[in-house]
Image (spheres, helix red, strand yellow):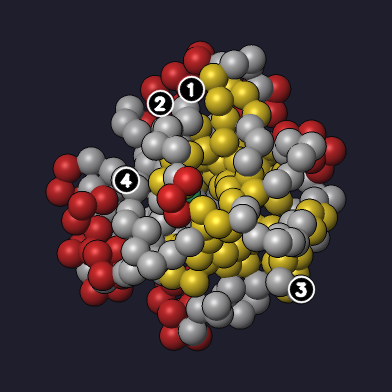
Amino acid sequence: MKVPNILVKSLLSVVVCSALLSGEIISKSINTKKTDSVTSSTKKVDKKHATHWGYTGHAGPENWGLLSDEHKLCKDGKSQSPINITKSVTVQAHSLEEIGFDYKTSISSVINNGHTIQVNFDEGSSITVDEIKFPLIQFHFHTPSENQINGEHFPLEGHFVHATKDGSLAVVALMFEDGLENPFLKKVWAKMPKKGGEKESLDIPASEVNALLPKDKGYYRFDGSLTTPPCSEGVRWMVLKNYTTISKEQTKEFLDLFEHNNNRPIQPINARKVVY
Ligand SMILES: [Zn+2]
Protein backbone atom coordinates (compact mmCIF):
# COMPACT_ATOMS: atom_id res chain seq x y z
CA MET A 1 0.00 0.00 0.00
CA LYS A 2 3.01 2.24 0.38
CA VAL A 3 3.75 4.69 -2.40
CA PRO A 4 7.27 3.82 -3.62
CA ASN A 5 9.97 6.35 -2.84
CA ILE A 6 10.52 7.36 -6.43
CA LEU A 7 6.82 8.02 -6.72
CA VAL A 8 6.90 10.07 -3.53
CA LYS A 9 9.59 12.26 -5.05
CA SER A 10 7.66 12.87 -8.24
CA LEU A 11 4.52 13.30 -6.19
CA LEU A 12 6.15 15.91 -4.02
CA SER A 13 7.44 17.83 -7.02
CA VAL A 14 4.13 17.85 -8.81
CA VAL A 15 1.90 18.08 -5.78
CA VAL A 16 2.82 21.75 -5.47
CA CYS A 17 0.21 22.48 -8.14
CA SER A 18 -2.17 19.74 -7.14
CA ALA A 19 -5.46 20.06 -5.37
CA LEU A 20 -3.97 17.70 -2.83
CA LEU A 21 -1.49 20.35 -1.96
CA SER A 22 0.57 19.70 1.14
CA GLY A 23 0.21 22.43 3.70
CA GLU A 24 3.77 21.79 4.77
CA ILE A 25 5.14 22.38 1.31
CA ILE A 26 3.09 25.52 0.95
CA SER A 27 4.11 26.99 4.27
CA LYS A 28 7.77 26.22 3.55
CA SER A 29 7.62 27.96 0.21
CA ILE A 30 5.96 30.93 1.85
CA ASN A 31 8.44 31.06 4.72
CA THR A 32 11.34 31.35 2.29
CA LYS A 33 9.68 34.43 0.86
CA LYS A 34 9.42 36.30 4.11
CA THR A 35 11.83 38.93 2.86
CA ASP A 36 9.32 40.01 0.21
CA SER A 37 7.48 43.13 1.15
CA VAL A 38 3.98 41.90 1.78
CA THR A 39 1.71 44.76 2.66
CA SER A 40 -1.61 42.99 2.94
CA SER A 41 -2.43 39.80 4.81
CA THR A 42 -2.72 38.09 1.44
CA LYS A 43 0.42 36.25 0.49
CA LYS A 44 1.44 34.77 -2.82
CA VAL A 45 1.86 31.03 -2.90
CA ASP A 46 4.94 29.95 -4.80
CA LYS A 47 3.77 28.14 -7.93
CA LYS A 48 6.59 26.03 -9.33
CA HIS A 49 4.63 23.50 -11.23
CA ALA A 50 5.81 21.73 -14.34
CA THR A 51 2.58 20.92 -16.14
CA HIS A 52 -0.51 22.98 -16.36
CA TRP A 53 -3.69 21.01 -15.80
CA GLY A 54 -7.26 21.96 -15.07
CA TYR A 55 -10.88 20.92 -15.36
CA THR A 56 -11.83 22.42 -18.73
CA GLY A 57 -10.65 22.30 -22.35
CA HIS A 58 -7.37 20.81 -23.51
CA ALA A 59 -5.93 20.62 -19.98
CA GLY A 60 -9.07 18.87 -18.66
CA PRO A 61 -9.36 15.45 -16.99
CA GLU A 62 -9.72 13.51 -20.30
CA ASN A 63 -6.20 14.63 -21.23
CA TRP A 64 -4.41 14.59 -17.88
CA GLY A 65 -2.64 11.31 -18.74
CA LEU A 66 -1.34 12.80 -21.98
CA LEU A 67 -0.08 16.10 -20.59
CA SER A 68 3.06 14.67 -19.03
CA ASP A 69 4.82 11.34 -18.52
CA GLU A 70 4.52 11.95 -14.79
CA HIS A 71 0.73 11.89 -15.17
CA LYS A 72 0.59 8.54 -17.03
CA LEU A 73 -1.39 6.85 -14.27
CA CYS A 74 -4.28 9.23 -14.94
CA LYS A 75 -4.93 7.18 -18.12
CA ASP A 76 -3.19 3.85 -17.41
CA GLY A 77 -4.04 3.31 -13.75
CA LYS A 78 -6.39 0.49 -12.76
CA SER A 79 -7.35 1.73 -9.29
CA GLN A 80 -8.29 5.30 -10.02
CA SER A 81 -10.53 7.67 -8.07
CA PRO A 82 -13.26 8.82 -7.89
CA ILE A 83 -15.73 5.93 -8.16
CA ASN A 84 -19.46 5.32 -8.08
CA ILE A 85 -20.27 3.39 -4.89
CA THR A 86 -23.16 1.11 -5.87
CA LYS A 87 -24.69 -2.02 -4.33
CA SER A 88 -23.05 -4.24 -6.94
CA VAL A 89 -19.54 -3.24 -5.91
CA THR A 90 -19.99 -3.13 -2.14
CA VAL A 91 -19.31 -5.98 0.26
CA GLN A 92 -20.21 -5.96 3.94
CA ALA A 93 -17.15 -6.59 6.08
CA HIS A 94 -17.47 -8.65 9.24
CA SER A 95 -15.77 -6.01 11.30
CA LEU A 96 -14.54 -2.92 9.59
CA GLU A 97 -12.30 -1.09 12.04
CA GLU A 98 -13.33 2.37 13.17
CA ILE A 99 -11.31 5.27 11.85
CA GLY A 100 -9.24 6.47 14.81
CA PHE A 101 -9.89 10.20 14.53
CA ASP A 102 -7.59 12.38 16.62
CA TYR A 103 -8.20 15.90 15.34
CA LYS A 104 -6.91 18.26 18.01
CA THR A 105 -5.14 21.11 16.24
CA SER A 106 -6.54 24.30 14.72
CA ILE A 107 -6.87 25.36 11.12
CA SER A 108 -4.40 28.16 10.57
CA SER A 109 -4.78 29.20 6.93
CA VAL A 110 -6.87 28.96 3.78
CA ILE A 111 -5.40 28.74 0.29
CA ASN A 112 -6.78 29.13 -3.20
CA ASN A 113 -4.40 26.97 -5.23
CA GLY A 114 -6.16 27.62 -8.52
CA HIS A 115 -7.91 24.23 -8.44
CA THR A 116 -9.66 24.30 -5.09
CA ILE A 117 -9.94 25.95 -1.71
CA GLN A 118 -7.81 24.25 0.91
CA VAL A 119 -7.46 24.78 4.63
CA ASN A 120 -4.24 23.84 6.41
CA PHE A 121 -3.95 22.48 9.93
CA ASP A 122 -1.33 23.03 12.58
CA GLU A 123 0.73 19.88 13.06
CA GLY A 124 -0.50 17.25 15.51
CA SER A 125 -3.82 15.89 14.20
CA SER A 126 -4.12 12.42 12.72
CA ILE A 127 -6.21 9.36 12.00
CA THR A 128 -5.19 5.77 12.71
CA VAL A 129 -6.16 2.99 10.30
CA ASP A 130 -4.51 -0.40 9.75
CA GLU A 131 -2.53 0.40 12.92
CA ILE A 132 -0.82 3.21 11.02
CA LYS A 133 -0.96 6.79 12.22
CA PHE A 134 -1.61 9.16 9.31
CA PRO A 135 -0.96 12.83 10.13
CA LEU A 136 -3.65 15.22 8.87
CA ILE A 137 -2.25 17.63 6.31
CA GLN A 138 -5.16 19.55 4.81
CA PHE A 139 -8.85 19.64 3.89
CA HIS A 140 -10.16 20.79 0.50
CA PHE A 141 -13.34 20.78 -1.58
CA HIS A 142 -14.82 19.65 -4.89
CA THR A 143 -18.09 20.65 -6.48
CA PRO A 144 -20.03 18.66 -7.39
CA SER A 145 -18.82 15.64 -5.40
CA GLU A 146 -16.18 13.46 -7.06
CA ASN A 147 -17.32 10.12 -5.64
CA GLN A 148 -20.93 9.16 -6.19
CA ILE A 149 -23.19 7.04 -3.99
CA ASN A 150 -25.68 4.97 -6.03
CA GLY A 151 -25.03 7.16 -9.05
CA GLU A 152 -25.83 10.38 -7.22
CA HIS A 153 -23.58 13.39 -6.98
CA PHE A 154 -23.63 15.64 -3.92
CA PRO A 155 -23.26 19.41 -4.27
CA LEU A 156 -19.92 19.35 -2.42
CA GLU A 157 -17.35 16.81 -1.25
CA GLY A 158 -14.60 17.59 1.24
CA HIS A 159 -11.34 15.63 1.37
CA PHE A 160 -9.32 15.35 4.57
CA VAL A 161 -5.86 14.43 3.28
CA HIS A 162 -3.52 12.46 5.54
CA ALA A 163 0.05 11.47 4.72
CA THR A 164 2.82 9.62 6.50
CA LYS A 165 6.43 10.74 6.17
CA ASP A 166 7.13 7.88 3.78
CA GLY A 167 4.32 8.99 1.48
CA SER A 168 1.44 6.64 2.35
CA LEU A 169 -1.82 8.51 1.81
CA ALA A 170 -5.26 8.21 3.38
CA VAL A 171 -8.23 10.39 2.43
CA VAL A 172 -11.44 10.74 4.43
CA ALA A 173 -14.28 12.09 2.25
CA LEU A 174 -17.21 14.01 3.70
CA MET A 175 -20.29 14.64 1.56
CA PHE A 176 -22.33 17.84 1.85
CA GLU A 177 -26.00 17.55 0.85
CA ASP A 178 -28.42 20.39 0.06
CA GLY A 179 -29.84 21.84 3.25
CA LEU A 180 -29.07 24.34 5.97
CA GLU A 181 -26.23 26.79 5.73
CA ASN A 182 -23.06 25.19 7.04
CA PRO A 183 -21.43 27.27 9.81
CA PHE A 184 -17.99 25.76 9.23
CA LEU A 185 -18.07 26.54 5.51
CA LYS A 186 -19.37 30.02 6.30
CA LYS A 187 -16.12 30.75 8.15
CA VAL A 188 -13.95 29.28 5.38
CA TRP A 189 -15.84 30.93 2.51
CA ALA A 190 -15.62 34.32 4.24
CA LYS A 191 -11.83 34.14 4.07
CA MET A 192 -11.23 32.15 0.88
CA PRO A 193 -8.88 34.06 -1.42
CA LYS A 194 -10.43 35.12 -4.72
CA LYS A 195 -7.32 34.52 -6.79
CA GLY A 196 -5.33 31.33 -7.41
CA GLY A 197 -2.02 31.27 -5.58
CA GLU A 198 -3.15 33.33 -2.60
CA LYS A 199 -3.30 32.48 1.08
CA GLU A 200 -5.13 34.04 4.03
CA SER A 201 -4.80 33.32 7.71
CA LEU A 202 -7.82 31.61 9.22
CA ASP A 203 -8.31 30.42 12.77
CA ILE A 204 -10.80 27.59 13.32
CA PRO A 205 -10.40 25.43 16.45
CA ALA A 206 -10.35 21.63 16.31
CA SER A 207 -13.70 21.50 18.14
CA GLU A 208 -15.41 23.03 15.10
CA VAL A 209 -13.74 20.56 12.76
CA ASN A 210 -14.92 17.67 14.93
CA ALA A 211 -18.43 19.18 15.03
CA LEU A 212 -18.46 19.15 11.21
CA LEU A 213 -17.98 15.38 11.16
CA PRO A 214 -21.08 13.16 11.55
CA LYS A 215 -21.53 11.42 14.91
CA ASP A 216 -21.80 8.03 13.23
CA LYS A 217 -18.52 7.68 11.39
CA GLY A 218 -19.38 4.54 9.42
CA TYR A 219 -17.70 4.57 6.04
CA TYR A 220 -17.11 2.97 2.65
CA ARG A 221 -13.54 1.88 2.12
CA PHE A 222 -11.66 1.18 -1.09
CA ASP A 223 -8.25 1.50 -2.72
CA GLY A 224 -7.95 4.44 -5.04
CA SER A 225 -5.78 7.27 -6.25
CA LEU A 226 -5.27 10.99 -6.04
CA THR A 227 -8.11 12.58 -8.03
CA THR A 228 -5.68 15.14 -9.45
CA PRO A 229 -2.48 14.66 -11.44
CA PRO A 230 -0.24 12.69 -10.98
CA CYS A 231 -3.19 10.36 -10.04
CA SER A 232 -0.86 8.25 -7.83
CA GLU A 233 -2.41 4.99 -6.64
CA GLY A 234 -2.20 3.17 -3.30
CA VAL A 235 -4.40 5.75 -1.56
CA ARG A 236 -6.66 4.46 1.24
CA TRP A 237 -10.10 5.98 0.63
CA MET A 238 -12.76 6.26 3.33
CA VAL A 239 -16.04 7.89 2.28
CA LEU A 240 -18.21 8.67 5.31
CA LYS A 241 -21.74 7.25 5.02
CA ASN A 242 -23.34 10.15 6.85
CA TYR A 243 -23.42 13.68 5.53
CA THR A 244 -23.51 17.27 6.59
CA THR A 245 -25.28 20.11 4.80
CA ILE A 246 -24.48 23.03 2.55
CA SER A 247 -26.93 25.71 1.46
CA LYS A 248 -27.56 26.36 -2.23
CA GLU A 249 -26.08 29.86 -1.76
CA GLN A 250 -22.87 28.39 -0.31
CA THR A 251 -22.49 25.99 -3.24
CA LYS A 252 -23.04 28.87 -5.65
CA GLU A 253 -20.46 31.00 -3.85
CA PHE A 254 -17.81 28.28 -4.34
CA LEU A 255 -18.78 27.72 -7.98
CA ASP A 256 -18.76 31.44 -8.72
CA LEU A 257 -15.18 31.65 -7.49
CA PHE A 258 -13.85 29.03 -9.93
CA GLU A 259 -16.50 29.51 -12.65
CA HIS A 260 -16.47 25.77 -13.39
CA ASN A 261 -16.82 22.41 -11.65
CA ASN A 262 -13.68 20.97 -10.08
CA ASN A 263 -14.56 17.27 -9.97
CA ARG A 264 -12.73 14.53 -11.86
CA PRO A 265 -15.24 12.23 -13.65
CA ILE A 266 -16.02 8.75 -12.28
CA GLN A 267 -13.31 6.15 -13.03
CA PRO A 268 -13.74 2.41 -13.79
CA ILE A 269 -13.97 0.23 -10.69
CA ASN A 270 -12.18 -2.69 -12.45
CA ALA A 271 -11.46 -5.53 -10.00
CA ARG A 272 -11.98 -3.49 -6.85
CA LYS A 273 -14.63 -3.93 -4.20
CA VAL A 274 -15.86 -1.39 -1.70
CA VAL A 275 -16.19 -2.62 1.87
CA TYR A 276 -18.46 -1.13 4.51
ZN1 LIG B 1 -9.77 16.14 -3.44
Quadrant in which the N terminus appears: bottom right
Which amino acid lies under the numbered mark 2 shown in the image of this protein? Leu
Could you give the CA–CA distance between mark 4 and mark 1, rounded to whole angstroms?
Answer: 19 Å
Q: Nearer the viewer, mark 4 or mark 1?
A: 4
Q: Write down the residue under mark 1.
A: 251
Which amino acid lies under the numbered mark 4 shown in the image of this protein? Pro
Say whether disc 4 or disc 3 marks the residue closer to the N-terminus: 3
- Whether tag 4 and tag 1 are in contact, CB under 8 A, the answer is no
Q: Which mark is residue 265?
A: 4
Which amino acid lies under the numbered mark 3 shown in the image of this protein? Glu
Q: How many marks?
A: 4
Q: Nearer the viewer, mark 4 or mark 2?
A: 4
Name the residue located 64 percent from the left edge and 15 percent from the top edge.
180
Residue 150 visible, this orientation: yes
Q: Write down the residue under mark 3.
A: 131
- Whether tag 1 and tag 2 are in contact, CB under 8 A, the answer is yes
Say whether disc 4 or disc 2 marks the residue closer to the N-terminus: 2
Could you give the CA–CA distance between mark 1 and mark 3, rounded to whole angstroms?
Answer: 36 Å
- Whether tag 2 and tag 3 are in contact, CB under 8 A, the answer is no
> Can you give x and y, in whole percent of width and height, for residue 145 in the image?
45, 37
Q: Which mark is residue 255?
A: 2
* Numbered disc 3: secondary structure: loop
> Can you give x and y, in whole percent of width and height, for residue 28 in the image?
60, 63
